[in-house]
Amino acid sequence: MHPITTVHYLALSAALLLIGTVGVLTRRNIVIILMSIELILNAVNLNLIAFSHALHNLNGQIFAIFVICDAVAEAAIGLGILIALFRNKETVQADEIDLLKW
């Protein structure tokens, strides 16, 4: 049985990053776009923690906690904006929201 190495974590992180990026670029639903951004942030966290563990340094893990806090704030603010947009436009499709157009 082979031990789990940093390469395994990096491969999983790359897969999460790819799925998140494809979700942001191809989806029209704002909720799905926000979830895809969360996947991208989780890929970053996985990289930070994997390298922190490999280098025997806690700085990456501490920084990952700050990224998690930032993701929570982003989700709260994003969902608040989404609710306000839904009340105004009655849609959650990103291409139908044109409030900032002249």
Image (cartoon, rainbow, N blue to C red):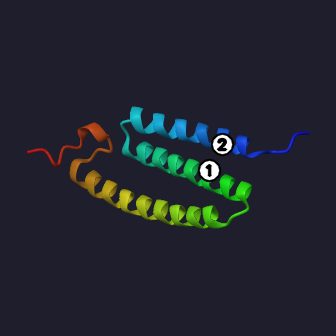
Q: What residue type is labelled 2?
A: Leu
What residue is shown with label 2? 10
The residue lying at 61 percent from left, 61 percent from top is 60
The reply to whether the C-beta atoms of the residues labelled 2 and 1 are less than 8 Å apart is yes
| Viewer-closest of 69 and 60 | 60
64 relative position to 31: left or right: right
31 relative position to 87: left or right: right
The residue lying at 38 percent from left, 57 percent from top is 79
Which residue is at the far left?
Answer: 102
- Badge 1 local density, few (<14 within 10 Å), some, or many (20+)? many
Q: Which SS class for mark 1?
A: helix
| Viewer-closest of 20 and 61 | 61
Q: In x, y percent, where is residue 43?
A: 57, 47
Label 2 to label 1: alpha-carbon separation: 6 Å
Report the disc number at residue 47: 1
Q: In x, y percent, where is residue 38?
A: 50, 51
* Relative to 34, residue 18 above or below: above
| Viewer-closest of 1 and 26 | 1
The residue lying at 66 percent from left, 38 percent from top is 11
Q: In x, y percent, where is residue 12?
A: 66, 41
Q: Quadrant of the N terminus?
A: top right
